[in-house]
Image (cartoon, grey):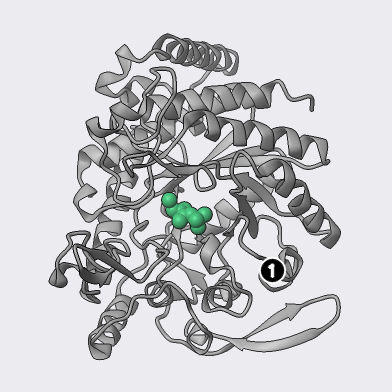
Amino acid sequence: MAKLADAPDLGSGGVTPVEVRVLSPALFIMTSWNPTSWQSKPASQQPTYGDAKMLDSAVAALSQLPPLVSSWEIETLKKQLADAACGKRFLLQAGDCAERFADCTPERITGQLKVLLQMSLVLVHSTKRRVIRVGRLAGQYAKPRSSNDETIDGVTLPSYRGDLVNDIEFSEIARTPNPNRLLRGFERSAMTINFIRALIDGGFADLHHPEYWDLGFVEHSPRASEYQNIVASIAESLRFIETLAGESIGAINRVEFFTSHEGLHLHYEQAQTRQVPRRDGWYDLSCHFPWIGARTTDLNGGHVEFFRGITNPIGVKVGTHDVDVEKLLDVLHPTNEPGRLTLIHRYGADKVVDELPKLIEAVQRTGKQVLFVCDPMHGNTSKTDSGIKTRSFDAILSELEQSIEIHQNNNSNLGGVHVEVCGQNVTECTGGARGLDEAGLGDAYETLVDPRLNYEQSIELAMLVGKKIDSKPS
Ligand code: PEP
Ligand code: CO
């Protein structure tokens, strides 16, 4: 996370309409936008609240609270993403599928930070590019679901939609969407960001001390020695450069860290969307980098309406769901602003070879630049015979490796990865160096929604992807 700048980013809670230009080759429309204009469109995946007044007062309370991030940090990230789009940096976006309120603990937060820092170190080493670290954390509390309801033993209740909305426990009271959870989620996001900022400012992310990032169980990992060699080689390079420079290199004492989540719950995002002094436009200050999930990319829907008006860099998940990429770029990326748009493709290991070239070609036809990132998780989810949701390490790696090659063969560049990982020793995805099999999934299966790579699998993936990129002729 960028250091807080000296002047505070106060934001303003008001919702004055603003003119936003939507340019398309065929037409030029001026349509008014404001943080609530999404409400005039059909917005899918929103919870049904029984008490509209309670929702209004939660949103009003959220609109008064100070923002979680600043526009300075957001603009810094946008510039870095623009660099990634042209191959000068590499994006690592990683974290939980669904954060839980109960995970707002020092152990869990440092665990996630450690995995991200270690993965990024491995990627820096092999890609020779600066790595942008973006956590799926401090707000990844709302989840899209395939069905509004869930039925167990003849009892039908609302589906679990993430801790921001309701509780996973299967009881009427727990599953009823509760607007007060918006405030609870916001507070936990603030506590998470605060702790991460304190750790980073205190020197936790100092590249001279990667031993701070070690996790207890790492020494028994099959890849431990390879990781330690990378750390040793980076430490040696640092000493070498500092000897030449005759001083310690300040910028290396501290890494930057950014936050992201799926911008799914539109009342929540709206409440944190502000105008800031001395800048144009509206910033969604709930995180640096919100993204539109694959199920909410409808061009006429509320999510696209909300996202087109915010100034943040934004991501859009693109899968086999029907989406007209050229029109999407017209609406979300009208001015081709560097760093504005990241397309996160998630096709699955068996479909990427057919689908990705079409996506690249569609983008190239527009003449616009986007950052392409691969999410190798969401197209590779399967169920075991006993009904456990899992993903195979080999399929995840395969989609990533194929994506690197496909971009390379199509005059394009894979500029990052988007993965679901966990800093604990969970058993949710099969495979990896330790050869976790289906029978082992029950040992530590914790995720509330999608299976995550555990610590060892995450580092291994970073190593193998790094090698593949490193071997790519540039
Ligand atoms: C997710 O990122 O957890 C998710 C639901 O992904 P997608 O929108 O790609 O399905
Ligand atoms: Co997920």
Which quadrant holds residue 51? bottom left
Residue 469 image offset from top left, x and y in percent? 67, 27
Badge 1 amino acid: Leu
**Which residue is at the front of the view, 218 or 118?**
218
To which residue does mark 1 refer?
328
Residue beneath the point at 71% across and 39% down: 87
Q: In this view, does 112 lie above or below 55?
A: above
Q: Where on the picture, by quarter, is residue 321?
A: bottom right
| Mark 1 residue element | helix
Position of 99 with respect to 466 (left or right) is left
Which of the pair 254/426 is nearer the observer? 426
Q: Nearer the viewer, residue 71 or 40?
A: 40
Q: How far across and how far down the image is residue 21, in percent?
A: 71, 81
Q: Where is residue 319 in the image (x, y as percent from the top left)?
A: 61, 55
**Residue 202 visible to the viewer:** no
Residue 44 in view in this figure: yes
Please identify the quadrant where the C terminus is shown. top right
Q: Residue at x 47, y 85 (%)?
A: 36
Residue 366, percent from left and from top: 82, 62
| Res. 334 image quadrant | bottom right
